[in-house]
Amino acid sequence: MPSSTDARNANVGLNLAGKTAAVAGGTQGIGAAVGLRFAQAGANVYIIGRNEQLGREVVEKCREQAHDAGDGRTYEFIKADLSSVSEVRRVAEVLKEKSGSKGIDYLVTSQGGPPNGKYIQTSSTPAHDAHFAVQTLSRFGLAYLLASSGILKDTWVSVCAPAGEKGPEPDVDNLELEGAHRDKWMLGRVMGQAKQDSALGDAIAVQFNQHFPSLRAVHLFPGFVYTNALASASIVPRPVLWAYGYVGPLMARFTPMGNLPAWYAEIPVYIGANPSARGKGLEASNERLKPLGWPAWAEGTTGKKVWEKLKAMVEV
Ligand SMILES: NC(=O)c1ccc[n+]([C@@H]2O[C@H](COP(=O)([O-])OP(=O)(O)OC[C@H]3O[C@@H](n4cnc5c(N)ncnc54)[C@H](OP(=O)(O)O)[C@@H]3O)[C@@H](O)[C@H]2O)c1
């Protein structure tokens, strides 16, 4: 079965000199590793996130490890809290200014984290559910704003959780799952959010392909990648986190769906930017490079409704 090793082999010699990648959620975890892999392949890299220290460290690593560096390549950190629509819009403007007429070739959205079963309103105006705002709205917003303004030139890769051909429809009348937090079962709340994240992610990728036929949307399931995501989500009790610190790295190394961030990063770079990955149906796929397909409803009325609602939220 193919895996990140096959992607790594295919990426040997990949030369992305002259290309530019913007990685949202690039300060740590999967996004940081993907940003670094783009730099190693010779691309310019913009890292976007809230944590300035981590962001600057990733940029510094990009500079150190960049293939054939020292010829005016760009590695920059853009500090932003993407839970706010105005910040999403500002980041799109900053990328437009910085990238100039060459634009951005690859947008990677890896920001956010696992479903947390909470419903907490952001302090920005207008307010949104914080998980929805980062996991869905900011991803849609960056992709939509960069594509509709002609800044995005090639592919948008979103690392989240495609549900595949048979994936269920989202709740279109309640995109943010308002009221779902009253469900007394934590597991039910988390599962509901996970289903909504997957479905909305599929809907916006399929609709993106329809609205911008010269561009490409990719939605990837990373399997299990050992990162700080559980700790960042702050829903897991301390003793479990402590145990996870020991078990997680083993799961990443020795289980079939496990990867360390640097191993997994080969996959988004392969599918997003390696010409040899095109035409293989990998636009919705998993960590085994298995094509999952798109749900049919995402092309029809449901997908269109999701697109229009998110567009209205971003254009407000
Ligand atoms: N790891 C896995 O096994 C796994 C499995 C399935 C799906 N996923 C999905 O893959 C994505 C990446 O996961 P990961 O494991 O790499 O997570 P991670 O290590 O926690 O990284 C998340 C990134 O998102 C950024 N971020 C979070 N909130 C943000 C905000 N409000 N504004 C801007 N940036 C924000 C963080 O940066 P700052 O803190 O600097 O803002 C960080 O760079 C997540 O969406 C996750 O749900 C991961």
Image (tube, grey):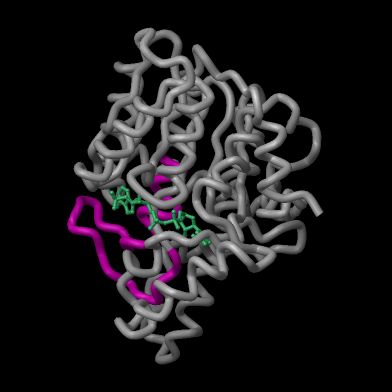
Say whether residue 95 is left or right of residue 208: left
Q: Find residue 279 and report its horizontal and vertical position in percent.
A: 80, 32
Between 23 and 179, the one lying in front of the other is: 23
Give the image quadrant in which the ligand numbered 1 is located. Answer: bottom left
- Depth order, front residue of 52/146: 52
Q: Residue at x 49, y 39 (%)?
A: 34
Q: Is residue 71 above or below residue 4?
A: above
**Quadrant in the rendering for residue 314:** top left
Q: Was residue 316 drawn as part of the magenta stretch in this picture?
A: no
Which stretch did the figure color magenta?
A: 114-141
Q: Place residue 185 in its image quadrant.
A: bottom left
Could you say where residue 86 lies in the image, as x and y percent from the top left? 25, 40
Measured as percent of width and height from the top left, residue 271 is found at: 66, 36
Please state, as top left, top right, bottom left or bottom right, where the C terminus lies in the image: top left
Which residue appears at 27% of the width and 69% of the height? 120
Location of residue 32 in the rendering, given as x and y in whole percent from the top left corner: 40, 43
Say whether residue 267 is visible.
Answer: yes
Which corner quadrant of the image does residue 244 belong to?
bottom left
